[in-house]
Image (cartoon, coloured by chain):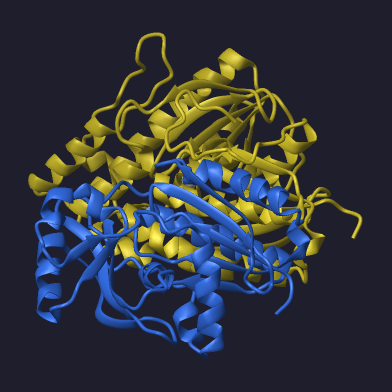
Amino acid sequence: MSGGWLCIETTGDVLGVAVLGADGGLLAEIGQQAPRLHSALLVPAIAEVLRLAGLSQASLGQIAVDRGPGSYTGIRIGLAAAEAMGDALGIPVYGVPGLWASAASRSLEGLYAPALDARREDAFCALYEVRQHGLPLEWIAPGMRPIGEFLEACRPFGRPVEVMGDAAGRHGELVRGYPFVRIGPSQMGAARLGLFAIRAREEALDDALSTAALYLRPPAATTRRADG
Amino acid sequence: MNDLLCLGIETSCDETAAAVLGRDGRLLGSVVASQIDLHEAFGGVVPEVAARRHLERIGPVVREALAQGGIRSEDIGLVAVTRGPGLAGALMVGLSWAKAFAFARGLPLVGVNHVVAHAHAAYLHTAPRYPDLALVASGGHTDLFLLEGPREVRVLGRSRDDAAGEAFDKVARSLGLGYPGGPAIERLAQQGDPGRAPLPRVGLFRDSLDFSFSGLKTAAQTLRRQGLVPQDIAAAFQAAVFDQLWERSALALRQTGCRRLIFAGGVSANGYLRERLGDALRRQGLALLVPPMGHSTDNAAMIARLGLTMYEAGERSPWDMGAEPVIHPFKP
Ligand SMILES: [Zn+2]
């Protein structure tokens, strides 16, 4: 693999972009609190992170992008931009499962529950075990569920669980009521996407790196008038 | 390649489209992926379903448009994209794609108004000439406007309620026809007699060239409940739509002094309306200008056409250009 990694994160309130060297070394990273502004701010953020890294568009070798779950519109903004840049530059694009990559960004062994706010009582969440070697093992598959229901499902494991992501902050009182829960970081940074892609490719898990969006929910069927 | 090639991208509603147009007017590639099958069961477009399908299709559609003309991404010199009006989630797919593609290759970007682009579809087979009067009628809009330049548009009239195409869809549904309603009503109307179904005529609003189709739609639905045959209702409805389109257009032509009328948008694919508008204009020594076959409904060639014209007039859009789901009064 040659050329730098561009990492794109647009699935949550924070717009994240990062540039890694071919070996995965972090060259530059930006995180910007920008709810509902990802469509306008993504390309300017990419221009800025490339400038900070001292790289041109043409020196990129591949792109890693969060393919969900999270904001539906955000998922699409990131995937569309990543695919377009991949086509324009003739370089591969890796879609990264966001929750798995969040767990993989933790180095200490144990149970990790990335959980993203999905409005009302719901969260996009999953349970992983970080081990000494290899990518984290999946115990509860990614899905959208009431956060309380999810934490109940974590209880029988009988071990501490670190809840990561913005759902913990959104439902602080409820989450802290579970004695086995430890609150982890709410933001993980876009660099984790490239690092995950590098490890997944080393472990020949390329299937996990498709560019299909991970919405985890069927669309709500309310109609608008057609155009033509 | 010496010619400046413009890649046009359109995702404002339920068609994912890409096209490559040369500055010299050659259309090198044009692909439209329709989602009609997806939305048919709902009788309208489901925004989240549309946005998801746009993301799945945009890559393959752009690649196919390039492949049709044997064009590589490095041959493109300009990117034009629809920024509105349209469905927010759908627009953002095309915008994100277009901006990232242009940025990656260091190309200029031009965001265009979808309705103004519909009118520019008529310039796909003849060079733009301003000023020109345009009537754009589709499922999402019915607008009468004066094109004073690629970036100067003066709205003269618009629908106060349903868009013309929307009225076609709703009447078609009440007659038990499928979606989209336009082609179905046109076929059925050929076997009907408009004189047997009395429909109200909508007079001009005072000091305004605005349209109204909602009353017409309701009256057609009432006639159906009263047991009139669908063929006659379809024929009468279509004739009443023509009367209204022509009345407003004729007045606007007189007011502006324009010598021709551009008729574009999905409703302009209706053969009956085209023919009658053409006849009416000819009788006054005026001309009808319509898009080439297949370019009345949403497509990306019209986006590239307007984008190129605006680019030549000095337009450059910034990287932080956002979607504009509602542009009112609309900007080019
Ligand atoms: Zn349209």
Residue A150, percent across and down? 15, 68
Residue B47, percent across and down? 33, 52
- In the displayed image of the protein, which residue is found farthest to the bottom? A204
- Chain B on-screen colour: yellow
- In the displayed image of the protein, which residue is found farthest to the right? B2
- Chain A on-screen colour: blue
| Viewer-nearest residue: A170 or B274 | A170
Residue B62, percent across and down? 62, 64
Q: Residue at horizontal 40%, vertical 70%?
A: A106
Q: Residue at horizontal 55%, vertical 69%?
A: A194
Left or right: B60, with B230 as reference point: right
Residue B184, percent across and down? 34, 58
Q: Is residue B291 visible?
A: no
Q: Is residue B248 visible?
A: yes
Q: Residue at horizontal 35%, vertical 64%?
A: A69
How many marks can you see?
A: 0
- Is B221 rendered above or below residue B75? above
Quarter residue A202 falls in: bottom right
Quarter residue B86 falls in: top left
Left or right: B155, with B150 as reference point: left
Quarter residue A128 falls in: bottom left
